[in-house]
Image (cartoon, helix red, strand yellow):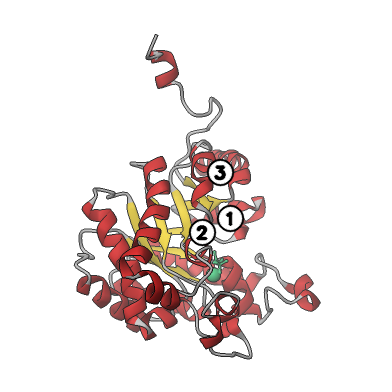
Amino acid sequence: VEHDPVEEVRPQSPVKPMTATEVKVNVSIPEAAERAAATGADGVGLLRIEHMVLSLGQTPDRYVAEHGEKAFVDEIVRGVRAVADEFYPRPVRVRTLDAPTDEFRQLEGGDDEPHEHNPMLGYRGIRRSLDQPETFAYELQAFRRLYDMGYDNVEIMFPLVNDAEDVHRAVQLLREQGIDPDRRTWGVMVETPASALGIESLAEAGIDFASFGTNDLTQYTLAVDRNNEHVADRFDELHPAVLELIGSTIETCRELGVDTSICGQAGSKPEMVRFLVEQGVSSISANIDAVRDVQHEVKRVEQKLLLDSVR
Ligand code: PEP
Ligand code: MG
């Protein structure tokens, strides 16, 4: 028999619970796409471009100088497409490049990278993309190509945004590459206190979603370097100050019709899942291995909230 109809309709996992809050999955390398999709996740909450670029062994500028623009764009298209294919039509949220200079420096061509006292507070994410629009354009060309190929499940996410000015400038660059922001789904990571406190103006700037990058939001709210072992015991994503920023952002976003999500590591932790579902988050993105547990935790909290509401 060529086709086994039973096989075709069988759900990817028999025990996936139905939840109102979507549960998505984080994908850091395209090679993990199949395993990630098999979790039955409702989409990809974070696909990092970093690996696709860093694995080339050269900085983007060096790679383009040696192999040409098209080859660089091809690499990004290939990586994103592998995931977008696997998940289609489930949405795949792709984050534009966010590698700190110390990671770029290890690549061929990295000698030209600026030396920074604290790369985490420095030249990375949307700041660098806006400062180097020619290099950023390659990423946007990749998105354009994917849309032209019909991958309308691809969403664009900008990292380390602080304010509406960042958003306006990023959107302008989207337009310049022929991407219509009104036709595509795009948004920002909320990973600086400024972006959480200024969420209203970000919403006015047109974002479709805000996704909590709790790894950075925690580091910047508590002034605790996420890579410093001496203060590692102070790195607490559940600190009241972090939760206050997340809770108020969700509330504002709900009022303004903006989707909310989490794509930081804390999205895989039951305590955070509980807090977010209670606050009314739209979706939670977890690590591949945590997706099933998060699905069940979300279900449990949703049922409890429902019971509480009729009591
Ligand atoms: C975060 O900051 O929570 C996040 C998901 O981004 P990254 O870990 O890549 O900085
Ligand atoms: Mg981050």
Find disc 3 in the rendering and name its residue.
Answer: 298
Q: Residue at x 34, y 57 (%)?
A: 155
Question: Residue 68, percent across and down?
Answer: 34, 70
Q: Secondary structure at mark 1?
A: helix
Amino acid type at image mark 3: Val
**Looking at this rendering, what residue extends furthest in the top direction?**
1
Q: Going from the N terminus, do you reach mark 2 or mark 1 first?
A: 2
Q: Residues within 10 Å of mark 3 (few under 14, many from 20)?
A: many
Q: Going from the N terminus, do you reach mark 1 or mark 3 first?
A: 1
Q: Is residue 292 above or below residue 192?
A: above
Q: Quadrant of the N terminus?
A: top left
Question: Residue 85, percent across and down?
Answer: 37, 43
Q: Which mark is residue 267?
A: 1
Find disc 2 in the rendering and name its residue.
Answer: 262
Asked if residue 311 can be seen in this view, the reply is no
Quadrant of the picture in which ligand 2 is shown? bottom right
Q: Residues within 10 Å of mark 2 (few under 14, many from 20)?
A: many
